[in-house]
Each structure stands twice: as structure tokens, then as C-alpha cells.
Amino acid sequence: MAFLELQHLHKRYGDFTAVADMHLDITQGEFISLLGPSGCGKTTTLQMIAGFVEPSRGKVILDGRDITALKPNQRGLGIVFQSYALFPHMTVAENISFGLEMRKIPRAERRRRVQDALELVHLAPFASRYPRQLSGGQRQRVALARALVIQPPVLLLDEPLSNLDAKLREDMQLELRSIQRRLGTTTILVTHDQSEALSLSDRIVVMNQGQMIQVDAPFQTYEHPGDSFVSDFLGKTNLLDGEIIDRQNDQVRVRVGSIEWDAPGSAQLGSVQVSLRPEKLLLTAPAAGRVQGRIQTCLFLGNHWLYQIECPLGEILVTRPNDGGDSLSEGAQIGLDWPAPACQILARSSADE
Amino acid sequence: MSETSSRKQPYLLSAPALILFLALLGAPLLMTLLLSFNGFDFNRGILPEYSWANYWEVLSDEYFHEIFLRTFGIAFAVTLICMLLGAPEAYILSRMRKPWKSLFLVIILGPLLISVVVRTLGWALLIGGNGVISQTLKALDLGSFNLMFTTTGVVIALVHVLIPFMVLSVWASLQKLDPAVEDAGISLGASQFTVLRRIVLPQVMPGILSGGMIVFALTASAFATPSIIGGRRLKVVATTAYDEYLSTLNWPLGAAIAMLLLLANIVIIASYNRLLERRYARIFG
């Protein structure tokens, strides 16, 4: 049974529709990411759950109770803000204790729970510091502890890691995931960072222009994107304009430019988009492979190489793990190949029309 | 460029301003200080002798005690009222929507654009014995009303003159407030009032206190408003010094009064500032 239900949420500002028909059932303990480019309605959705924005239509049901009309201070949800929004005039311990004070928890229990929360986020030695004496990552963890200490039924995270540098962000992702697993708090994360959504969530909700495009587990969403928008937004991909010229059973014949090949799928005849993920393409000796091409640019990215290949399909990106061997040189002639399932036939994104 | 000349450069660049400052503020102040030690005789004028007599006269005379107490009493009251009115005013202003915000900001800052004398005379027309309020009350048979030459009148007029400084000061610290901080408080279960009291107020406190410092200093040395509304009957230190200079022609005594006011102001403001810094350095940096 769903723990948190978003029932046909709409939000309109004048003529502008920020969120259209958001309908989602979230089970207890689930980690859901709302993923999309800026202005896609993900933050508005979060604000409607939190109660800071009133939906134009639709309901928010928490544990069987309609909370749509409830004020944000009556909902009891934990929120981590993008700017962390720590109280600068209070120490770390006072920040964390604030929500408990509002709940009239007795002093002794308050102290114990603050201590537990501090230990949960590994900040026990910093209890009496002020926020400005902490690093970005530490502030982030104070914000998390402050939101979690009130034992909220749902934790809302508004781009919580976007202000951290790349290395710290990865550490925090791991930590966030393990804390969430341990406490089992139902969590909704708003992010525009696809790697964050992929690594943290049980399910990803991909949004664009106020619409839910796809709701699926991260691996499913990545491997079987619903349309070209999802495919392009999640990870890197080569999106090619093509055409289905024949179909039989589970097999279709695709044509892109002058090249034709067979791919699994059941798309209708006519114009489509074809997605080839860079990491699934193989570089072969010249004259082997499906397409012939020439390496135009070669970038070394540490754990892998990124090649830009000029070929009849257009400019194609190919990545190859860095296995310690030599790279191919720019200008070299090569062949391009891929296993049949790597080619995905996608409906055009409604946004492109 | 050599190292010495680059070290001298800041001084050279600020020299014109520094010279102007010394000539126009430092010199007259020094001359006033010297003057305050001179003797005075009604027949012979300023005497070329130096003593503490003038200071002794001010410090030992009940008449001057009363004036000093009144001055700082008024300054304290005006500061307190400006804090109580100005801080909420600034907060409400910061919460207003687009066109109204700038409109009301102009209205609040408007008094700064009008001469103090003109503004104070306006108050005199309003609150005087034959003023608008008094005449209205008389017409309604509710008795008469006069705030001219009263402490209340002076305080009201000074609050009006000085409240823009408080609003501006609080406004500046409100600009530094992260709006999400209030949402965070609410999400943790606090009511709007609790958020104001426990989260907004402590963060704008430095703004309120430094605004208070400006208002206090300006009130304690205010001249135009107390002299128009308070007149000769309700003297403050600044008007007393003025009278010594221009009515009694006892310049040395006037100078001593002025120096004592300056000294009192410096002591009060410096100790207040130290208190502030000690309290907030750790939190706000």
C-alpha cells in the first residue's frame, strides 16, 4: 500500500503550468528522485509536498490522511534545503534541537536525541560550533541531522548536494544512502544531477516541462528510456534521426542516412530516434564493424577515453575504459560496431515536437 | 615600482581627503578644545588664561546636570522607540511585493530629503497650542492640547526625523537573511511568531543595535528639532551650548559644554560598540 500518494497534483501560475498531473504512489522506506532540468517542476512538486506551495488541483495523502490543506508546520516532514538554511545564530546542537523544542520534548530526551543525531552524521565533536565555523560538507550534515532528528515520516531533499565539490558529493551520496537505509525513512530527492539520482534512488521520476516522463528503477530508466528526452538526459548518448523501413515479429530494420541495420524492437514504420550509448559501442579494425569512420578527437578522462568519431552516421561519441593500453590516435581509420541490443529505438520526446 | 613607494602609495592617495578632514574637522575641534579652557569676563570678553573653571562650573551646577540628564533621557527614549517601530517596519517592508516595496521605502526615506527645520516646523504646526490637532479638539469641545515645549513633543519629532536610519540599518541586515531559513523553522514545527522571535529577530539584532547607535548619537547631539520644539524652556545640551555662544557670548563655557557632550557621546558609543562586537563576533564574524 502506498505510504505517500500524490494524486493528480497540478500547479498553475497564471497561464504557466509548473506541474501537470503529477500522480505517484510512494511506498514506505522508498527513496524516490525527482530528476529533470531546471524549470521542469520538480522543486514545485517538492514544495507542494512540504506545504509551501498550494496545489491548484490534486491531493497529497500521507499514510491514508489527506494533508493537502495542512500548514507546513503541521505536516512534520523533514526538509533539507539547497542552501542548508541553518540558523546562523545557533550552535550545531541548538540547530538540531530546535525541532525537538517545538515538539515540547523534555530537556533530557532532547539532549539524548541531539547526541544520537550528531553521531549519526559523525559531527559529535562539533556540537558547540556555529554554522559559519563549519565546512560545506559539515553544514550539509547538520542540515540532514536537523531534519532527521524529528523522526519525520518523509524526508524531503532539495538539491542537497549541489553546493558541494565533486569529491565530497560522492562521499555524501554514499553516506546519505547508508543513513537512509539504516533509518528506513521514506525520502524524496529533487535533483538535476543524473548520477545522483541513479546512485541513490530506488525509483527515478524523470520530469520535463511539468510532466512526468518516466517512473522506473535507475537501471531500467537508463537501459530502457521511455523517449529520447530521457535517453539524452540520463547519461550520455548518441541520438540519431532515423527511420523504420521494415518490421517483423520482434525485429525492425532501421535506416540512418545511408546505413541500415536490424535492431530488436516493435516500433511502427516511420521516423524515429535511435539511441546508441557511447559505452556500448565497440571500436574495431578498419573494414570490420558495421560502419567505417575516422577518429576526430580523443580525450583522456582518467578512467576512460572519449573518442569523437566522424562516420556516415554523423559525429558519434564512443567511450572506452582505460585498461592501461595505448590509446588510438586522432585521424586513425577505425570500424564501429555494436551488439544488436545496444541500439534502442525511441519515440521522439513530446518536447521536441 | 620599488617596495617603499608602493607602501607609501595608499597614504599619498588618501592624503587630499586626509588634509581636508584635518583642516575642516580636526582644526576647529582642537580650537574649541583650547577655547574651553579659556577664562571669560562679561566686561573684558575671553581671557587669555587656562583653567578647568568652565568644566568645573558645568559639572558642579544642578542646572547643567538637568540639561545633560534630559538630553540623554531623550536620546534613550528616541532610540528605544525607533527600535520598536523601525525594526518591524523594515521587516514588513522587506516582505512587500514588487511595486509597493519601493514605494513604501521612498515614503519612509522621504523625511531624509526634506530639511530638518522644515520638517520640525511642520510638527510644530501639527502639535502646537494653535495647531491642527488642538484646534480640532477645541472644535469638538474636547479641551485643548499642546506638545510644544514638552519632552514628548521633542521625542515625537526626533523619532520621525531619525527612524529612516533605523529602518535602513535593519533593512541591510534583513538583506543578508536567507529566506529559506524561515521556511526551515516552519518545517520544523515553529509557528510564524516563533520563527520571528527565535530565528529572524536574533539575526537582525546586530542591525537593530547598530541602528540604535546611530540614532542615539544623532539624538544626543540634535540641535534643530529640540531648539524649535523645545525652545528655551526645554533646553538640551546642544541648544545650551548654542545659547552660551550666541546669547550670553560666553564662548569658553559653550565650548566646554560642547566638549563634554562629545566626550559623553564617545564613551557611551564606544562601550556599546565593544559590547556588540564581543557578543556577535563569534556568530557572524
Image (cartoon, helix red, strand yellow):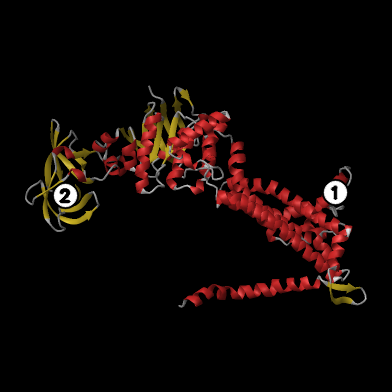
Q: Residue at x 42, y 32 (%)?
A: A9
Q: Are marks 1 and 2 on the same chain?
A: no
**What's the residue at 23%, 54% (across, down)?**
A300
Residue indicated by mark 2: A313
Q: Nearer the viewer, residue A58 or A179?
A: A179
| In the image: residue B85, left or right of residue A94 | right
Q: Give the residue type at disc 1.
A: Ser
The chain to which mark 1 is attached is: B
Judged from the image, the secondary structure of the residue bearing numbered disc 2 is loop
User: Which quadrant holds the C terminus of chain A?
Assistant: top left
Residue B134 image label: 1
Vertically, is B245 above or below A163? below
Quarter of the view holding residue A198: top left
Tell me: B262 left or right of A317. Answer: right
Q: Amino acid at mark 2?
A: Leu
Q: Nearer the viewer, residue A322 or A199?
A: A322
Q: Position of residue B241 (x, y in %)?
A: 82, 65
